[in-house]
Image (spheres, grey):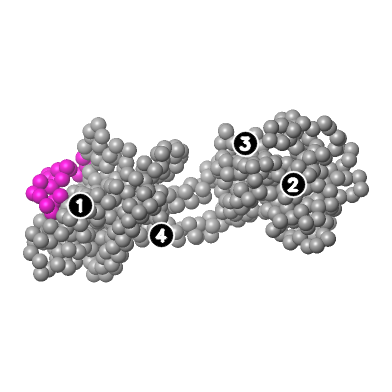
Amino acid sequence: MMDGRRRRRGRSNPTVLPLHSSICQLSNTVSCWFCDFKFLILNEPLFHFGRRYSRWFGVWFTIGIGFGVATLVGVTVVLLYELGALLVYRGNTFFGLPFLFTGPNISFRSFVYLCVSSIVSVLVHEFGHALAAASEGVHIEYIAIFWAVFFPGALVAFNYASLQALPAVASLRIYCAGIWHNAVFCAFCTFVLFLLPYILSPFYTYGEHPMVMDVAVSSPLSGYLSPRDVIVSLDDTHIHTTEEWKHIVMLLTEQSKLLSSGQEIVDGHKGYCVPHSLSQEITHSLGKGSETKCPNELTTFVSAPCLDSSEYDNNKPVINLPKRWESIQCLDAKDVLKFKKCAYSKMETPTTNKSGCVCSEVESCFAPVQRPGQQWVEITFSSLDCQNVGRNSDATDSNVGQNSDAADSISLERSCFQTYVFVGDVNFMARSIHLTSYQPRWYAEFAAYLPNTLERFFTSSFHVSMLLALLNSLPVYFLDGQSILEGIIHHSFISLNSSKRRLILRYCLLGGTIISATLFLQMVLHRVV
């Protein structure tokens, strides 16, 4: 971001972008790989604003020096540590920076958010440089917004003579201002994300239940869930926000890994009291590896009568399938879901002589058979309109107090709920739908997407701004780290002559550039392989 400014310090030929006092108010440059838009309309307002409050900005950007120097030292230590880990562990570094390379699987929507947040973060970065320069009395020659290949950016061109005449501390204020403003912008994004539920509370409810924004065509939930559906519970656990959804998915994934032993298993947590009239004995067939087989429209169940604590292991009841295979049934999951459950609760600790049987004499307890890497997960959901009707009815009932109306409201609420059973990879299922923790009080097409858009924008801006600050802190050529390091060396090694200070700077930048490039290439190759 400081490429143009550094070139002015080292050579009389300033930058790739020419600086002329006769430049018009608006101009642009276009080539096959680069285009920019330069304007001068903000030069005078920024300069007068910076000079007017120069005392306050001096304190503000002096704090930025401390942050910028500390960040440069921090990333330098991390680079050296990463280099040592790379040499010792041959590529298996401890820290790593996986967020530097997102890979080719980024969606178009995510790419748009990335571009917009990049433009905003770069503008914040360059605005910091411009404001710091104005407060030090350095004139701005122009501000440019550019697009190089696939990457947007911006830069501020300063008056070279004024910049050279500044003391070392004043120069450091300007060079550290971009990193400092990116850090402050990260704090601002965090603050907005924290307050967003309160800011939007007049128009949206937050934390009741996550609402479906989009369902991928390839999703196993496609055809069952639709936009504006509300997820009530996942595997008998009520959820209120998208974070709870992700947390439960993670727990289910870990549970699947623990339960999976390369063979078919039965989780005793998932049992249903099936009437004898529904369960019909059929001739089962065992496939390769003792795998049970049922028609595609049916699910394999195994009888689990009177489970006792001896068959439970650390609150993870697992039935040994080979001992139970003689009572296998092929049942329709939609029919089974209507019946009450007959297994231990996940929150219960099994005790001696305690039975999981709660079924009547005309019922039998059956549990679904799960294959390795697959789980039986119940998803309870309802439509947003149905939820709103039930909510409004509850409010009316509380005011009127009529028992019959309250009973009708409860009946309506129960009729809203639908339960779908997913059997398969829970992670894939979770990634195939897009949820939000907000529900609009009054539905409109744009209004439903506004909170999610704001969340994604500020989240993306936080990560991009943080990444921009870290990258510009690297002690490498063509970034702010070069100018900051130069200012530190010129300010700290006063006893050395200029040629020795330039030699120290050159070696530091050369080493930092080589180490950074090596680690980046190693990370890219690791992701590609």
- Cβ atoms at labels 2 and 4 below 8 Å apart: no
Residue 365 in magenta stretch: no
Q: Alpha-carbon distance for marks 3 and 4?
A: 38 Å
User: In the structure shown, which secondary structural element does the residue marked by tag 4 occupy?
Assistant: helix
User: In the structure shown, which secondary structural element does the residue marked by tag 3 occupy?
Assistant: loop
Q: Position of residue 68 (x, y in %)?
A: 28, 62
Q: Nearer the viewer, residue 110 or 319?
A: 319
Amino acid at circle 2: Asn
Question: What segment carries the magenta color?
Answer: 7-27
State whether residue 467 appears in this view: no
Q: Residues within 10 Å of mark 1 (few under 14, many from 20)?
A: some
Q: Alpha-carbon distance for marks 3 and 1?
A: 52 Å
Q: Position of residue 328 (x, y in %)?
A: 80, 38
Say which label, 3 or 4, has the lower sequence index: 4
Say which label, 1 or 4, has the lower sequence index: 4
Q: Position of residue 74 (x, y in %)?
A: 32, 62
Q: Foreground mark, 3 or 1?
A: 1
Residue 22 in magenta stretch: yes
Image point 86% across, 37% down: which residue? 278
Provide the residue designation for mark 2.
320
Q: What is the chief secondary structure element of the magenta stretch?
A: loop
Tag shown at residue 3: none
Q: Alpha-carbon distance for marks 2 and 3?
A: 29 Å
Tag shown at residue 510: 1
Provide the residue designation for mark 3.
220
Q: Alpha-carbon distance for marks 2 and 4?
A: 54 Å
Provide the residue designation for mark 4.
188
Q: Is residue 412 left or right of residue 458?
A: right
